[in-house]
Image: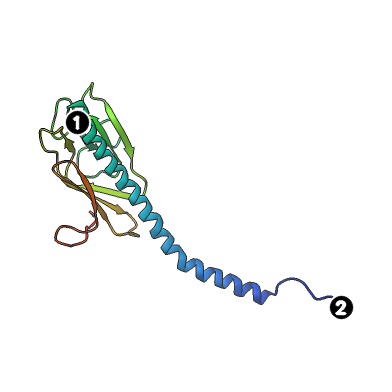
Amino acid sequence: MQHGQRGITLYGLALTLALVAIFAGLALPAFGSLVARSRMHTEIDALFHALYLARNEAIMRRRVVSLCPSRDGKSCSPGLDWSSGWILFANRDRDEPPRVDPGEPLLRVHGVAPGIRITANRRGFTVRGTWLRATNGTFVVCDEAGRAPPRALVVSYTGRPRAATATPRGEPYRCAD
């Protein structure tokens, strides 16, 4: 009685590894795009919730609440780049553009995930109670590697945000260079 050999051949192993390499090569770009979209979605959600918190706090406190870019999580940074992070605070003296002064409480501090770029057409967004309109504007959120198309968060005069993929003219948003 002769026993059959067990194991795999070199040819079978090479063929299996080649197929795994081909499928991995096809799947990795799609996976990278999925991860980029997920990170962008997370940052848009964080801004979305911050704006709703700002509206709620402005009404409850009957004060101005401001959102501004911040590199250190303590003060507003100049410019339109929000990629380092942002802060939300009660802007008691109503300065414009917003600036954190002594005695103005921080309501939220957020650091942006690596690889995500956020720009806005405003240096800060101010939400007032029900008596005056808020600052309107647009955030554009981009994957720095270009693996996902840019998305925008558009803020209305009432302070309500909405996500968008195209401008009012139907053109896709573009990332700042």
Furthest residue in direction right, as rendered: 1
Give the percent coordinates (x, y) of residue 110: 32, 38
Give the percent coordinates (x, y) of residue 33: 38, 60
Tell which of 79 and 50 is nearer to you.
50
* Mark 1–mark 2 distance (CA, rounded to whole Å): 87 Å
Q: Residue at x 37, y 47 (%)?
A: 114
On screen, 86 above or below 170? above
Whether residue 100 is visible here, answered yes or no, is: no
- The residue beneath circle 2 is 2
Q: Residue at x 33, y 50 (%)?
A: 41
On screen, 73 above or below 83? above
Q: How many marks?
A: 2
Amino acid marked by disc 2: Gln
Q: Which of marks 1 and 2 is in front?
A: 1
Q: Which mark is residue 59?
A: 1
On screen, 29 above or below 63? below
Quadrant showing the N terminus:
bottom right
